[in-house]
Amino acid sequence: MSAPVCTRPARATRGGADTRLPWWALALPVLAFVALLLLILNPADAHAAAGQPAAVAHLLEWLRQLTAR
């Protein structure tokens, strides 16, 4: 007894895989690029953030809440 064969026609693609990326797959590299570009353009602002650890903690908490949704 042979197994049934799927006779559904194959989807035609135009030379590549048909995939969809989530929004953050493009947004995160763009954000990193812009941040690094701004640091290069204005190196005076590229100092260590020793005086404001609360701001970094607040930003990380905000990012955690955003990704938890």
Image (spheres, rainbow, N blue to C red):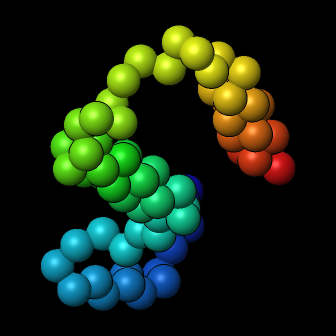
Residue occupying the point 75% across, 47% down: 66
Of residue 12 and residue 61, the one placed in the foreground of this image is 61
* Residue farthest along the top direction in this orientation: 50
x and y, in percent, of residue 9 in the image: 41, 87
Residue occupying the point 75% across, 31% down: 58
x and y, in percent, of residue 36 in the image: 28, 43
20 w.r.t. 48: above or below: below
Query: Is 41 left, or right, of 54 in this rendering?
Result: left
Residue occupying the point 33% across, 31% down: 46
- Can I make out residue 39 in this image? yes
Residue occupying the point 42% across, 53% down: 31
1 w.r.t. 54: above or below: below
Query: Is 42 left, or right, of 34 in this rendering?
Result: left
x and y, in percent, of residue 11 in the image: 38, 84
Query: Is 39 left, or right, of 59 in this rendering?
Result: left
- Can I make out residue 29 in this image? no
x and y, in percent, of residue 54 in the image: 72, 21
Image quarter in which the N terminus is found:
bottom right
Number of labels in the image equals 0
Query: Is 14 left, or right, of 29 in this rendering?
Result: left
26 w.r.t. 20: above or below: above
Of residue 40 and residue 65, the one placed in the foreground of this image is 40
16 w.r.t. 67: above or below: below
